[in-house]
Image: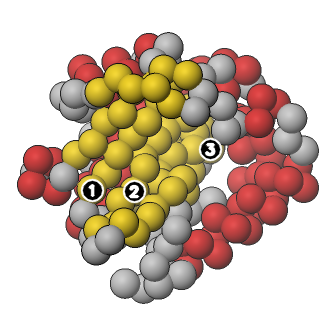
Amino acid sequence: MPGQLQTVLRSTKLPILLRVPNVEDAPALLELLSDPQNTEFDPHAGNGSFKLPQIEGMVVRMRESADSDVPGRVNLVLVDTSLGDKVIGLGGFGHIATEGAKRIGDVGIMITPEARHKGYAAEAMKMSIGYAFKVLKLDQVTATMLAKNIPMRSLMDKQLKLTGTIRDGEFGEEVFYSVLPEEWI
């Protein structure tokens, strides 16, 4: 599989696209990751402690991974094309692992408060999962969130029609979702 740097996933339903971030996206990502409304339920999001050079370094690492033949992650920015290609979120696969012969990717999405309740998050997740199976050739897609993250759980349960399993996790009670290619089709 060639690198994914040129990946652009366009929605056929909404004015959004997903693409690998560029360093020019770093200020928008810093704003996204600095907003407590976005990081409230994400223990990995830094709780507003990031600085622009750190975000720029993250973007460089995201691009390096996306460019590898077997990426360990493929992060994608969510762009609203009706707002002049404004970055409104971050999603994709923050972790892709090989377990035995299986490639498994953990999918997620974080969007700005003003972009919520428009169907963008659900569409971005659907696009990402389809991309995982068709292009990245993953064997399984997972999503894990804190049990108290009701907005994300609602997206998974109601919009994507997936069923989660509650379990104890590193940061407290969490919900784990999993889908296989044949279940997604």
What whole-number distance in Å separates the C-alpha atoms at marks 2 and 1? Answer: 7 Å
Q: Residue at x 32, y 71 (%)?
A: 100
Q: Are marks 2 and 1 in contact (CB under 8 Å)?
A: yes
Q: Residue at x 44, y 14 (%)?
A: 150
30 versus 154 height, above or below: below
Residue type at tag 3: Val
What whole-number distance in Å separates the C-alpha atoms at marks 2 and 3? Answer: 23 Å
What whole-number distance in Å separates the C-alpha atoms at marks 3 and 1? Answer: 28 Å
Instruction: Give the mark nearer the N terminus: 2 vs 1.
Output: 2
| Left or right: 125 as drawn, with respect to 60 | left
User: To which quarter of the image does residue 98 belong?
Assistant: bottom left
Q: Position of residue 144 (x, y in %)?
A: 43, 36
Instruction: Give the mark nearer the N terminus: 2 vs 3.
Output: 3
User: Is residue 160 visible to the viewer in this orientation of the structure?
Assistant: yes
Residue type at tag 2: Gly
Q: Are marks 2 and 3 in contact (CB under 8 Å)?
A: no
Quadrant placement of the N terminus: bottom left
Secondary structure type for disc 1: strand
State the residue position of label 3.
87
State the residue position of label 2.
105
Circle 1 Cα neighbour tier, 10 Å, few/some/many (<14 / 14–19 / ≥20): many
User: Is residue 16 visible to the viewer in this orientation of the structure?
Assistant: no
Between 83 and 103, the residue placed more toward the observer is 103
State the residue position of label 1.
140
Q: Position of residue 17 (x, y in %)?
A: 44, 51
Secondary structure type for disc 2: strand
Q: Position of residue 54 (x, y in %)?
A: 85, 53
